[in-house]
Each structure stands twice: as structure tokens, then as C-alpha cells.
Image (cartoon, rainbow, N blue to C red):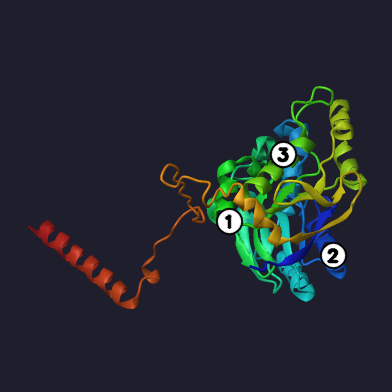
Amino acid sequence: MNLPIVKVAAAHVAPVYMDKAASVKKAVSIIGEAARHGAELVVFPESFIPGFPVWAALWAPIYNHEWFKRMTANSILVDGPEMAEIASAARQHGVFVSLGFSESTRVSVGCIWNSNVLIGDDGSILNHHRKLVPTFYEKMVWAAGDGHGLRVSDTRIGKIGALICGENTNPLARYALAAQGEQIHISAWPAIWPTRKPGNQNFDNLSANRIRAGGASFEAKAFGVLNAGFMDDTMLNMLLDGADSEAVEVLQRTPRAATQFLDPTGAAIGDMLQNEEGIAYATFDLNACVEPKQFHDIVGYYNRFDVFDLEIDRRRLMPTRFKDDHDAEPGLRRSVQRQEECRQEECGSAGAQ
């Protein structure tokens, strides 16, 4: 068995906050830079376009209406022009791209999802995933996703899967990807995750991300890309504008998340970035996924399929299903029409009697 060796880039970068057009331009530039440095897979953090809604953590929802309107206005369609521009860059440079974005829909002006796509080196979308459950205050921003994107893409550089932030806490979601032979596990995270006033923290974001991503790599015996966002001064100042003193302290003192890479044992490899913006790199030799499987192969011998049975519904959820006469085959339409005529004739006869 001879598996690929791949150079991976993780963009520990800030978006142009709440500006989808400028964030797309920045993403295209980063893809080009990473490709010139030999990367074959370029990963972006959670909700890179148009940025993570940190404001939902800082104030009560009644003070966030304007932020929400700005967020929805700068969310993008999975088949829209912004995504097409990024896909074109992936095709131009011959690289795979994993992108976190806030997704809009044509059927609602206010429904958005926390989504991720994997774009192939030919510019095609290989997988489109919507976060299953928005976490904590995210529920005031994003709708719940579905299982459609719980898929691993079999590519020339390996079998690639991705989960968004808190989904990496869900052992069943992680197993769903491991059970498809995942070799590269992407976990996307925000730059900051406030839960309490600093000094009274009840959640260590830095450690929590590392534990969850490490668990995914250790369980699946897969390489990990732990890709967090970055909060630059522009984003910080936008959030500070009009903030009270407590919110200011939270933003200034809450630890920033880190971007790093993991091997199939869960150990850190390659570059690590936390408090400075940049692109981190690592090289994955997928042949290293084999030996650890001898210790525990949770989708092979180290399982009891007679005891545990997992069923995953990967249907894309839709708001409704319409049934119209013109959707039927011509012969079927004639049959339906004749049945309706007969019904009306029978009703008319019954009324005459």
C-alpha cells in the first residue's frame, strides 16, 4: 500500500469582517499564496465569510438586530458568484479548498446556516455540510443543519472529512466520518469563544479544541487540521464600538484560539499559530495512518457491530415538497385528468339523483 504524501495549509487569518466581497478577495489571495508554497489542500476557519458572530455572545439578542441584518446581508449562496470565484481560484491553482462560510438561501431572507464546503482541485464542490446543531448563542444566528454533509470525499490526496467547531464534541458525528475511511480530518473553529467574564472562566477554548480535534485524530487514526480564525484590529474595533466595559474586558482578555496540525496518534506536528495572523503548513504522510490501526481500529476489528448499530440519515432537509400536475409525465397527467373528470361526473350523477 502506497498512500499519498500531501502538504497542507491552514489559514489562521481574519476575514474582512462582515464584508463578503472583500473576504472573498482575501480568500483568493491566500489560496494563491499557499499554492505557491506547495500546498495541495488549503483550509479556512469557521465562518470565514463574512466572519464569526462574536457579538451574539456579548449582548442580549434585542441589541443584536443590526448585527444580524448585516450578517444575513453578507452571507453567501453555495451556488452563488462568491463561491464560484473561490472555486475558480482552486481550479486555477490545482488545489483543494475547505471553506467555512455563513450560507444563505433563496427561499428565506433571514435563514442562514453555519456551513463548510470542500472544493476539488477542478473547482467542483465535493461536499457541502451544514453544522448539525448551532452551539450555545449561535442558535440566535444560525439554523440547524442536517446529515447531508456527513460525507468523506475520496480524493487523489486522501480521504477528507470536516466538522465545524462543536460538532467535534459529538462522538457519533466523528464516527460517521471515521466509518468512511477518513484520513484527513478538518475541524474549523472561531478566533474567540467567550462564555464568561475572564477570571471566572468555565470553558478553556484552547484546550477544548485541542482535546476534541485530538480525539478525532486518535479515534480515526487520521491526520488533523485544527484551523481557527484570527481576530484582527479591524474586527476587534467593530465589536468594541458601543460595547460596555464588561464586553470590552471579555474581548480583550479571552484567550485566542490556535491553529495547528495533528498526526494519527493525536500528537502535534507542523506549524502552530495563535496570536499572529498567517498561514500554517504541515506535511501529511498518509502511510502513517496504517500502523496505529493495529492498536485500535474503531471501524474495523476494534468494534462490535453485533452490539452497536448506527444509522445516519443523510437526506437534505427541505422546507416543503410541492406536487403539481405539470410535474407528472404526460400520460400520467392525462390519467389524473380523466380520473378527475370521472369523479366530477359521478358527483354530478349523485347530485341529480
For the residue pair 112 and 31, the one nearer the viewer reads as: 31
Q: Earlier in the sequence, mark 3 or mark 2?
A: 2
In screen coordinates, is 16 left or right of 156? right
Residue 181, horizontal then vertical, whole percent: 58, 58
Secondary structure beneath disc 1?
A: helix
Is residue 109 among what the camera can see? no
Q: Earlier in the sequence, mark 1 or mark 3?
A: 1
Q: Nearer the viewer, mark 3 or mark 2?
A: 3
Residue type (three-letter) at the residue carrying disc 1:
Gly
Q: Around disc 1, counting alpha carbons within 10 Å, would you say few (fewer than 14), some (14 to 19), or many (20 or more)?
A: many
Residue at image x 77%, y 44%? 190
Find disc 3 in the rendering and name its residue. Answer: 211
For the residue pair 19 and 42, the one nearer the viewer reads as: 42
Q: Which corner quadrant of the image does residue 348 belong to?
A: bottom left
Q: Which corner quadrant of the image does residue 76 belong to?
A: bottom right
In screen coordinates, is 346 left or right of 26? left
Find disc 1 in the rendering and name its residue. Answer: 149
61 over 319 or under it: above or below: above
For the residue pair 187 and 300, the one nearer the viewer reads as: 300
In screen coordinates, is 43 left or right of 126? right
Q: Earlier in the sequence, mark 1 or mark 2?
A: 2
Q: Which corner quadrant of the image does residue 237 belong to?
A: top right
Q: CA distance from mark 1 to mark 2?
A: 26 Å
Outermost residue on the top side: it is: 200
For the residue pair 155 and 194, the one nearer the viewer reads as: 155
